[in-house]
Amino acid sequence: MPAVSTMWKLLTELALAGSLFRVCSASYVSSMSQNAQELLNQSMSWMDSFYDSDVGYLYDVDGSAALRHETRSSVWYALGLLARNQGSDVHEAEKVIRNVVGAQFKNESLQWYGDYQKYPEEPMIGDVYPPSIYNSWDPNWRGFIGTTLVIMMEEFSHLLSHKTQALIIQSLADATVGDSYRVGGVDDDNLYPSYSNPSIMRAFVSGWTGRRIKDKNMTAAGEAYAKDIIDLFEMTNTLSEFNSGTYTGVSLFGLVLWSKYLPDDSIMSEYGQKMLQGTWSAVAQLWHPSMKNMAGPWDRSYGYLMNRYLSVMALWFWTLIGREQSSLISRPQVMSHSADYAWGPLVAVLADYHASLLPNNILKRIKTFSGEHVFEAQAYYPPYDKVPRNITTWLSESLTIGAESYEETVIGGPSMSQESFNPAVIQWKTGGEIGFISLWPTEKALQAEVSPGKLKLTYPEGNASSVFTLIVSTFTKMRTLSGWGDVQGLNVSVSGNANMSYSLSFGGSNGGTSQTIRDFEIWNFTYTMDDGFKGTPSLSLDLKLWGQH
């Protein structure tokens, strides 16, 4: 009888423990703000439909990989499983963690040591699958995955077995050592302190992991790298990687980690909130609440309208002002670049702490348009910027014009991507949608002048071969454009020393003499210079909304 009594007591204690875990789980989610809960629950519901429990990975969330799986989003999903903690969530999360860590690259002699497979079906990098940075392996995934593992340890270690915790710590140590191999300009790597989003994550993981495993050199390396990032920021009070719907959001993520998870003796803890607030100060002045877009220019963009592609910034806006007031539609998963919806659990878990770091004036500004104003700033991204870029953006109720003057060593901005670098951007309300005009970058230097209703573009290093290519939105009420007169909602008057006989082409998903850009169908207006032109190419746009005089 005593043995039965003891067994019954043990079973009762286990049942109570299980109940306690369920209560803790419910209290964790219920303790989050309503917006954070909605983001977590809705993004997780979307990812649930991609999860392959038999394998322990998500299917590729792009939905275009012939049922291959994907590593990074699986780790983000695992964090969401730990936060939700219902049914078998913790078991599945540990399965994902073991899979991802088990496939980490372990050869210390290779450039990709400590990095993570992009997908589990991937061949081994070698002769038949040659190493190609950002293709067969992506060094930034050390940061994307490493930071997520840190959040797991900080927020949910009580749910993880000791074995899984040990695997995570060893994985972080390996990733940190591997990331130390990265030097900008060496072996095709472009990681400089100015590459804001992965640099901020690199410094954090090194500083956190070094303290955790009591490796003073690792800790010091993270602190020293953070100092380089901070010094750059303090030159201009802006991120080097400036005004990106996606990557400003990632940098904010990293700065929240600096502020939340590092001790007072860390320079990252000291400066994290200051840099986060400085970044939000710029964002709040560039965000147009009724257009639901961040006005240009954009250093790196995955589209021309934030209310048609999914950005990480949109997820932060969701947590602060609600999804309806953000740039997201009711079903974010159908927007372009929807794979970044997988960021949802990370943003949701950090959302309320993040909100606590922001002053009320920023929250007020992103809710309601503050009236016509001009934003001016500088940003500096060495070694690609020869001098700091000068940024001017004018915002009115229904029209915004933003541009930057720069002198760089490459075409297409530091990412060397003409698709993502948008140095001059116009957006306006057409009456039923938002229209845009964006300068396609073709020069290493640009002088831009912005004033109310006016944009002047000058190529200081240009010549007779220079072109001005303006990428223009499509319009629901005018399917076919024959010239500027067909642009909806805006009268555009063009002048300058270029040949005013422009070429016009369409870039459509099913054809046209131009191509779609970042999924967007576009109209291409291109101006050339006259044969034998001498001087400095320039083009001016005078803009008036319909109904203005």
Image (tube, helix red, strand yellow):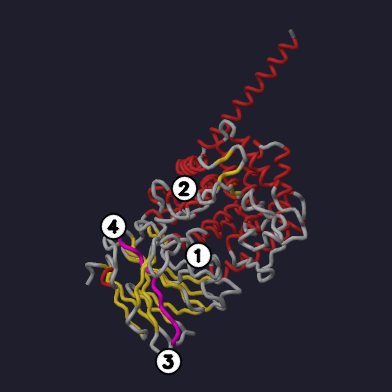
Q: Which element is circle 3 on?
A: loop
Closer to the eye: label 3 or 1:
3
> What's the residue at 57%, 71% (across, down)?
381
Q: Can you identify the residue that label 1 sits on? A: 300
> Upstream in the sequence, badge 2 or badge 1?
1
Q: Can you identify the residue that label 3 sits on? A: 534
In the rendered structure, which amino acid carries the disc numbered 2?
Thr
Q: Residues within 10 Å of mark 1 (few under 14, many from 20)?
A: many
What separation in Å lies between label 2 and label 1 (alpha carbons)? 23 Å
> Upstream in the sequence, badge 3 or badge 1?
1
> Upstream in the sequence, badge 4 or badge 3?
4
Q: Which element is circle 4 on?
A: loop
- Return the x and y of residue 41 as percentages of the image width and height: 49, 40
What segment carries the magenta color? 464-475
In the rendered structure, which amino acid carries the disc numbered 3?
Lys
Closer to the eye: label 2 or 1:
1
Position of the N terminus, as image quadrant, is top right
Q: Can you identify the residue that label 2 sits on? A: 319
Quadrant in the picture for residue 349: top right
In the rendered structure, which amino acid carries the disc numbered 1?
Arg
